[in-house]
Image (cartoon, helix red, strand yellow):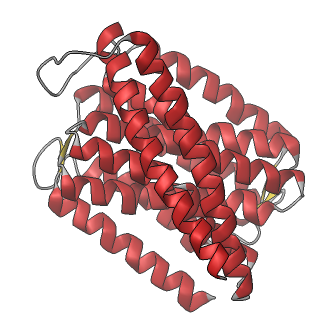
Amino acid sequence: MLLQIILFLFGLMLVVWGADALVDGASSIARKFGISEFVIGLTIVGMGTSAPEMVVSFIGAIGGNADIAVGNVIGSNIFNTLLILGLTAMILPMNITSLNLKKDIPINIVITVLLIVLGMNFSIFGCGDNRLSRIDGLVLLALFCIYMYISFRFDVPNNEEEPVETKKTWWAILLIVLGLNGLVIGGKVFVDSAVTIAKMLNVSDKFIAVTILAGGTSMPELATCVVAAVKKKGQLALGNIIGSNVFNILLILGGSALIHPLSLDQIGFVDLGILLLSSLVILSSAYVGKKNKIDRVDGFFFVLLEIAYMTFLVMEK
């Protein structure tokens, strides 16, 4: 147990270091090439911080363990929005741009609804079964390609601070590569040790996936967003969360379903309801309280929702 705790802490330290390097490198690239920090967060940072979820879900799919593959993504998306975005907003209130409102946030909601509709055919329509088939996986992967095209095609640079001296391109790219490696390796060490500790405590696969694995594989997003907030890069943080959530559903679940059809029988309507709610609260925060901003009150409300959901899961277990 002591060794696992040491590995757990080492993984956490590596994730935090990787996040710092990734944010610095990605921000520098964004400024140098006129790409908005939001789109950098949405793509490079979003995909990079979603790498642990991809590893865990793909391994779960290859092993035919749908509870791990699906539970990890659903839990991660809820964790990303409610806890990570909530904590980030409490550190640094984030502006919501008009493009966020017109494109990014609605797409996140639509994709979440699509996942529920595709995966819960029997429960919703009374036909078929509650699973993501290989056809569903192909649909999700096709939408992922379209989403990536749209993100770059309609990008509008919107720097939140005065221009600063950027790092040399080679150094910025090196920081991104090293940061991503730190996140992935640190995330894997963190998750492996967390799962080992959980197994010692005799808890179910679904509970491990939705709580420990989801929280563990979201450590890169947490570290990246907190560092971005401290560095006053709110759009990069928001882009990271929305990008990670979209990647988790379209790329990771799409790819996992293509490897092996994924049953959602063990995923309850409470889990899916909280998942949908987590995508809707980002939109509502633009109109409640300070307009077009996720402020500290919104962030506190997000965190309370996450605590309530975690409490439900512990009681359900």
Q: Where is residue 161 shown, x and y percent of the image?
A: 13, 26
Q: Residue 222 at x, y = what percent? A: 41, 54
Q: Residue at x 23, y 28 (%)?
A: 98
The residue at 44%/31% (across/down) is 42
Residue furthest to the top: 33
Quadrant for residue 263, please give it. Answer: bottom right
Q: How many labels does the image show?
A: 0
Q: Between residue 230 and residue 287, name the one nearer to us.
A: 230
| The one of 171 and 92 positioned closer to us in this rendering | 171
Q: Which quadrant does the N terminus fall into?
A: bottom right
Quadrant, the C terminus = bottom right
- Between 155 and 106, the residue placed more toward the observer is 155
Q: Residue at x 46, y 84 (%)?
A: 311
Judge from the rendering whether residue 34 lies leftward or rightward of residue 221; answer left or right.
left
Q: Which residue is drawn at 40% across and 51% down?
A: 223
Q: Is residue 305 left or right of residue 8?
A: left
Left/right of residue 91 with respect to residue 151 in the rendered view = left
- Could you say where residue 24 lies in the image, as x and y percent from the top left? 34, 30
Q: Give the quarter of the image for residue 180.
A: top right
Evaluate whether residue 116 shows in this view: no
Is 166 drawn above or below residue 312 in the view shown?
above
| Residue 91 pos. (x, y %) | 20, 55
Q: Can residue 85 be seen by looking at this rendering?
A: yes
178 over 125 or under it: above or below = above
